[in-house]
Structures are given as C-alpha cells and as structure tokens.
Amino acid sequence: MAVHVLLFDAGSDNEGIHSLELNGHTVVLLFEEMDDAERYAGLLEAQDFPVPTVEALSRDDMELFCVQAGYEARFVPAGFLPQSPEERLLIAPPERNMDVSNWKDDQPADANQPGQAERDAMEAFRRRLEGLL
C-alpha cells in the first residue's frame, strides 16, 4: 500500500522529510490520501515554511525507515477526524514551526549519517528483531 509523505528538496543531497515533535517523539506523517498530504503541504506553505513535495512511497518502506531512524510513523487515514489537540496536528501543522531558514547551513556535511552510537543502537535493535524471527 502506498502512503504519501512530505519531502523537502526531493531528489537532492539535502533531501529531508517533514516531521513533528509530539511528546518528545519525532513523528512522520503517512497520509493515505494524496489530497490530504497536498492540503497539509499548502498549510505549511501558508506559514512561510519551505514548500514540500508530496511523494507516494510504500507504507512498509516508510515504517521501516521510521523504525531505523528512531522516528514514529503515524498513519493518517482518509476522512480522519481528530479527537484531541495532539491528533489535530495530524491534519494541520502547529501554528508555530521551528525556524528552518538556515536548517541546511546548521548541519555538518554528514548530518544525515548516524553517529557510531546510533549505528550501534540500530544494529542491536536489528539483531533483537532478527531473534524474534
């Protein structure tokens, strides 16, 4: 099944994925409907956020990416109606966003590469998962 995610600088060396910080967790939104993802992207643009590209990707691949990166994947089904203020952020971005005017300049060239501690933790996690099989 395909889901729709918001990417910044898609296809470039600086490609990034839109995420939210919720209760201390980095959350990546996986929209079932392209229209919902495009609407969310338009709301970001209206807040002077860089304009993201909506990309359709495999849900399984995105969930695996999120696990490996230490993110939480949140599926936003078609017709989703929020029941709490936190869930409202799944259909509309927060009124205040992080300053991203220089997000590329602040990162070292290898910022997308995990550090040794992160690699070790991911490897240990992978071994535990394989042990369950």
Image (tube, rainbow, N blue to C red):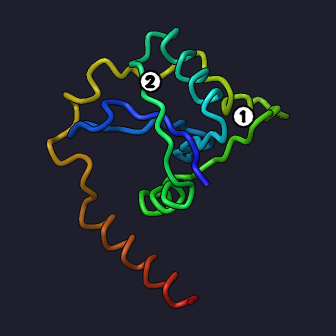
- Left or right: 83 with respect to 75? right
Look at the picture and state if 114 lies above or below 6. Answer: below
Q: Which mark is residue 86?
A: 1
Mark 1 crowdedness (10 Å alpha carbons): few <14, some 14-19, many ≥20: few
Q: Residue at x 19, y 28 (%)?
A: 105
Q: Quadrant of the C terminus?
A: bottom right
Q: Which mark is residue 98?
A: 2
Residue 67, image x, y percentages: 50, 62
Q: Residue at x 57, y 52 (%)?
A: 72
- Left or right: 122 with respect to 111? right
Residue 31, image x, y percentages: 62, 39
Residue 60, quarter of picture? bottom right
- Left or right: 22 with respect to 111? right
Residue 1, image x, y percentages: 61, 55
Mark 2 crowdedness (10 Å alpha carbons): few <14, some 14-19, many ≥20: few
Residue 85, image x, y percentages: 76, 29
> Marks 2/1: CA distance?
17 Å
Q: Residue at x 31, y 17 (%)?
A: 101
| Badge 2 vs badge 1, beta-carbon distance below 8 Å | no
Residue 32, quarter of picture? top right
Q: Say whether disc 2 or disc 1 marks the residue closer to the N-terminus.
A: 1
Q: Residue at x 67, y 29 (%)?
A: 89
Check disc 1 and report its element: helix, strand or loop.
Answer: helix
Check disc 2 and report its element: helix, strand or loop.
Answer: loop
Amino acid type of the residue that numbered disc 2 sits on in the rendered structure: Met
Which residue reaches farthest left? 109
Towards the viewer: 4 or 68: 4
